Amino acid sequence: MNFSEILRLVKGSSATPPEISPDVSCAYSSDLLSDVMGHAPDGSVLITIQNHLNTIAVCTLAGIKAIVLCHSRPAPDDMKAAAAREGVAVAISPLSQYEACLALSSLPASPK
């Protein structure tokens, strides 16, 4: 699924430059970044409320290509800069984590 489709499904807007538009193969939802590092599949989209710089660092380590920040949480400037530098797309969604997970439920929990 491409990032444009993710934005549409989660009713979101992008917090990263338009050229950062990865395809993702699966989804993972967690707010515990150590859990994300240990269990999120490579090539996934992370559904979370963690809107800070460390989230980008974890995504880079785990091979996560995109983030959906729920409850309209803004991406701080340092997070946006790191996301752009690392090529991680960031979406801001008004949906709750549960609603965002439902919206992206066509994505598997792990790569096929």
Image (cartoon, grey):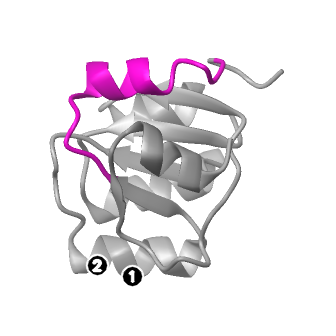
Left/right of residue 34 with respect to residue 99 in the rendered view:
right
Question: Was residue 96 drawn as part of the magenta stretch in this picture?
Answer: yes
Residue 81 tag number: 1
Q: Going 35% across and 75% down the picture, which residue do you hit? A: 80
User: Image height check: is 72 above or below 47?
Assistant: below
| Label 2, label 1: how far apart the Cα atoms are | 5 Å
**Position of residue 25 measured from the top left corner of the image (x, y, whole percent):** 72, 35
Q: Which residues are magenta?
A: 92-108
User: Image height check: is 75 above or below 34?
Assistant: below
Say which amino acid is labelled 2. Asp
**Does the CB distance between marks 2 and 1 fall below 8 Å?**
yes
Q: Going 27% across and 27% down the picture, which residue do you hit? A: 97
Q: Going 58% across and 58% down the picture, which residue do you hit? A: 60
In which image quadrant can residue 41 be found?
top right
In the foreground, 97 or 38: 97
Left/right of residue 56 with respect to residue 4 in the rendered view:
left
Q: Which residue position holds label 2? A: 78
Say which amino acid is labelled 1. Ala
Secondary structure under tag 1 reads helix
Secondary structure under tag 2 reads helix
In the foreground, 34 or 73: 73
Q: Going 19% across and 43% down the picture, which residue do you hit? A: 94
Dot 2: within a 10 Å radius of its alpha carbon, few (fewer than 14), some, or many (20 or more) residues? Answer: few
User: Image height check: is 8 above or below 25?
Assistant: below
**Position of residue 111 measured from the top left corner of the image (x, y, whole percent):** 77, 25
User: Image height check: is 41 above or below 49?
Assistant: above
**Position of residue 106 measured from the top left corner of the image (x, y, whole percent):** 60, 20
Dot 1: within a 10 Å radius of its alpha carbon, few (fewer than 14), some, or many (20 or more) residues? Answer: some
**Position of residue 82 measured from the top left corner of the image (x, y, whole percent):** 43, 76
